[in-house]
């Protein structure tokens, strides 16, 4: 089987639990480190799946790499190579299919409760997930909404039963969360007060229990997504 290609856009936004899942199931990853200048791949035939991680940038930014990623996503959909998008990755998947990325009604930083409508993907109908976003995606044509939250209606959608776009960060493990809650992260939280923004201390206080729950859901949805990998 060809590797799953992972697009990493920022240095401290690696694949986390997605990498651990792949290792546990004997799946190989090829991480494209865009933040180090690596080019977005163009050949869809060299991958069994495509995973797009988060970004501090907006999917609407006038960035040639983002348009190249959208082209790659459309190729993947055309060849039924499954795509999974985390936060920015979910937004980019929506945009590639004609969806719109707009300012969210409420920024979300910290833990939010997700309500899922498809247990086949999530293994649960209610669970906590890490959020860190200011924008949100609309549902593109043909998408099926499978998860929501109180402050951000569109949390996850499925296309053709094999592609998954998410607003939340199910890939976050403890090291990744700790790396985000550094001095820069704490400043960002302080500079963006709001009903959906939690303090760094509040996020840490909930982390042990919530990470165990979110990791179980991540394993469930990664298993479901991996069923579509091109063999």
Image: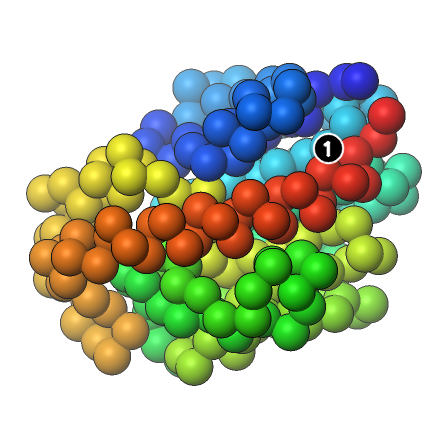
Classify residue 133 by image quadrant.
bottom left
Residue 112 appears left or right of 116: left
- Residue depicted at x 15% and y 57%: 205
Residue 166 appears left or right of 57: right
Residue 105 appears left or right of 26: left
x, y (%) of residue 57? 41, 47
In this view of the protein, can residue 146 be seen by the observer? yes
- Identify the image quadrant of the C terminus: top right
x, y (%) of residue 49? 73, 33
Is disc 1 placed on a helix, strand or loop?
Answer: strand
x, y (%) of residue 6? 58, 29
Q: Name the residue under label 1.
A: 49
Question: Total of numbered circles in the picture?
Answer: 1
- Residue depicted at x 29% and y 73%: 196
Judging depth in this view, the residue of 72 and 116 nearest the camera is: 116
- Residue depicted at x 11% and y 53%: 187
- Identify the image quadrant of the N terminus: top right
Dot 1: few (<14), some (14–19), or many (≥20) neighbours within 10 Å? many
Q: Identify whether 13 is placed above or below 3.
A: below
In this view of the protein, can residue 54 be seen by the observer? no
Judging depth in this view, the residue of 117 and 54 nearest the camera is: 117
């Amino acid at each position: 089987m060809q590797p799953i290609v992972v697009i990493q856009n920022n240095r401290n936004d690696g694949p986390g639990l997605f990498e651990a899942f792949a290792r546990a199931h004997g799946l190989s990853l090829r991480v494209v480190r865009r933040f180090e200048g690596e080019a977005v791949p163009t050949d869809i035939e060299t991958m069994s799946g495509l995973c797009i991680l988060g970004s501090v940038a907006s999917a609407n930014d006038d960035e040639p790499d983002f348009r190249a990623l959208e082209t790659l996503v459309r190729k993947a959909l055309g060849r039924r190579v499954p795509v999974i998008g985390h936060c920015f990755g979910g937004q980019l998947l929506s945009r590639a299919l004609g969806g719109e990325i707009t300012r969210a009604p409420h920024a979300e930083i910290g833990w939010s409760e997700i309500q899922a409508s498809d247990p086949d993907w999530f293994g649960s109908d209610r669970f906590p997930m890490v959020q860190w976003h200011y924008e949100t995606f609309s549902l593109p044509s043909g998408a099926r909404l499978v998860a929501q939250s109180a402050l951000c209606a569109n949390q996850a959608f499925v296309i053709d039963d094999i592609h998954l776009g998410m607003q939340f960060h199910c890939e976050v493990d403890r090291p990744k969360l700790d790396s985000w809650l550094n001095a820069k992260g704490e400043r960002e939280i302080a500079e963006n007060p709001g009903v959906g923004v939690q303090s760094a201390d509040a996020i840490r206080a909930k982390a042990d229990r919530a990470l165990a729950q979110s990791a179980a859901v991540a394993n469930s949805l990664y298993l479901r997504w991996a069923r579509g990998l091109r063999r």
